[in-house]
Image: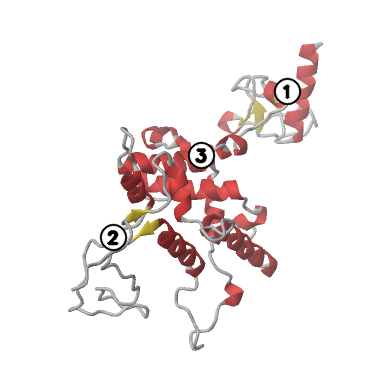
Amino acid sequence: MQQFRGNRLGPVDIRPDDKPHEIFLSMVTDPENVEIDVVNVLLQETNRYAEHRISMGNLKPRSRLQMWRPVCNEETKAFIELLLLMGIIQKPTLASYWETQDKLWLRRTPSFRSVMARDRFLAILSNLHASNNQKELPRDHPPYDPMHKVRPVIEVCNTAFRKNYRLGRDMYVDERIVEFKGRHNIVQHISKKKISSVGSQVNAYICHKRSFLLGKKLTHLQFHQEIVTCLVGEYKIQSRVFVRNGEEMGLRATPEHFLFEIPRGKRKKCVSCHKRKVRTWSKQCREGLCLGKCFKDYHKHKQREHEE
């Protein structure tokens, strides 16, 4: 029997000093064209699908697409970072990651709010796409691809896996012949086929472990956390900076300078527009005020008097 003589197995062109997020990005980037990666595929197709839905013109009044803006490269990476972080911090619902109620302070995860608003995350998630629907073929068409929804991502990743990791002699990738009994038109069950239950998991962490020559090694969780931290980058700082003008800060210098409902169903006359039977007032000023312009104009005037 002829002896197998191949190149050394394991990671290819991955240095020991490569950072976790660099190894991860190399696994989702086409090595033949660095401009083609999973991030750009998701960015382009998500924006395309959102614009198509908006152009249809049948949005509901409270639809998140009413305030839609195209996603950028940094925002797409931050979105992926939050998805990876959800694998570390597991909660029952998506909304629970953005909880702000005082009674739920033990379960809060403020890092999610600091990276991206809840509605923005859900808007991207509802429009997340990896392929162009306009190129989709009907099922009865001969070249129909049942995996067309994720085919661009699969092609990029498969190319990157083959380039960055060298498999052994007995490794063979066949997505159609696996030990699976469920109903699906891309797989078939062959009970007598010899297949390893473990297989070879080619991922960024394995490449990191196989190429690491320094003294410090990262666990799988630490490696995962490093990727999450590096992917978000400076996006959380850029997207969550709020600047308030001096007038607004002056109106909210004390918690009492808010509009409250007058207790016990009483009514007062608005001191700004002189409208009768107003149910709201400024508790600190003890004056009846209408909601909106009257409340703002009154406190602007009071602030100018205080400064003079």
Q: Residue at x 52, y 46 (%)?
A: 78
| Lower position in the chain sequence, tag 3 or tag 2 | 3
Residue 217 visible from this viewpoint = yes
Residue 249 is left or right of residue 182, and the answer is: right
Q: Quadrant of residue 302?
A: top right
Q: Residue at x 42, y 43 (%)?
A: 20
Identified by mark 3, the residue type is Arg
Q: What's the mark number on residue 200?
A: 2
Using the image as rendered, state which of residue 245 and residue 195 is in the foreground. Answer: 195
Identified by mark 2, the residue type is Ser
Task: Kindly report the distance in space between the C-alpha atoms of the residues bearing marks 3 and 2.
Answer: 37 Å
Q: What's the mark number on residue 246?
A: 1
Q: What's the mark number on residue 113?
A: 3
Q: Residue at x 66, y 63 (%)?
A: 51
| Lower position in the chain sequence, tag 1 or tag 2 | 2
Residue 191 is left or right of residue 280, and the answer is: left
Q: Secondary structure at mark 2?
A: loop
Task: Kindly report the distance in space between the C-alpha atoms of the residues bearing marks 1 and 2.
Answer: 60 Å
Identified by mark 1, the residue type is Gly
In the image, residue 301 sits, relative to residue 33, either above or below, namely above
